[in-house]
Image: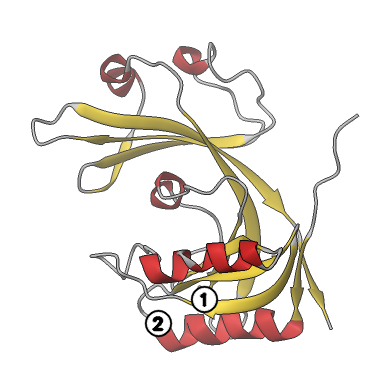
Amino acid sequence: MNTPIQPVILPQSIYDEIIAHARAGKPEEVCGVLRGRDSRAKELFRGRNIAEDKINNYTVDPQTLLRQFEFEDAGDAMMGIYHSHPVSVAYPSATDAWNAHYPDAYYLICSLEFDDAPVIRAFKMTPTFPDLDMEALRQALPFEEVRPGLFGLYVPAGGPIPEPLQSVVEDPSRAFYVVFNVNGAGKVDEHRIVFIEEHPVEVAG
């Protein structure tokens, strides 16, 4: 029997604050963290986006991320990390997958693709680090350079798993990215497969 997907529960005030932050930061991406327990958010902390290209990427500043230890001391956790997509859909990009370093946190994305109809969706992103011949793989599969030096390939849930990946990805029910970066010589430096699982968002009064 499949385990039920846990909904992410946001108080109305936090839901509204994420949207307000996204609108205030447009056209740049904004970001922050959520304090809470399990899948229920209790408090929002706006962060600073310190990415070099803030229009297309985000990196939460270290001071905001360090709040997770304050949360843990109080019996809570950094249960969520949010950021905005000012002009694109509320779905993780290859860059988002590459930057997903907290597999226990929910990643919330606020899309302002249609400013009068913002959308917030939540995901778990789980990185894995299989032993792959990435130099051969990059020749065999249609990777896209999503930002300078970073390449990604997306496989949707239920889609056919490319033959070179079938030995390391056995479950076709989960969407995933294969992402890697290259060094100054153009050779693969690091790589990972990041599995994507969407969780419904519920707004509580």
Farthest right residue in view: 1
**Left or right of 59, for residue 18:** right
Amino acid type, callout 2 = Lys
Tag 1 near tag 2, CB within 8 Å: yes
Q: Residue at x 42, y 46 (%)?
A: 94
Q: Which percent across, then down, holds residue 125?
A: 57, 45
Q: Residues within 10 Å of mark 2 (few under 14, many from 20)?
A: some
| Residue in the foreground of this view, choosing between 132 and 74 | 74
Residue 97's disc number: none
Farthest left residue in view: 185
Q: Residue at x 60, y 37 (%)?
A: 175
Q: Which percent across, then down, holds residue 166?
A: 54, 14
Mark 1 to mark 2: distance in Å? 9 Å
User: Can you identify the residue that label 1 sits on?
Assistant: 112
Q: Considering only order in the chain, which callout, 2 or 1, is on the residue closer to the N terminus?
A: 2
Q: Residue at x 57, y 20 (%)?
A: 169
User: Can you identify the residue that label 2 sits on?
Assistant: 26
Amino acid type, callout 1 = Leu
| Residue in the foreground of this view, choosing between 21 and 90 | 21
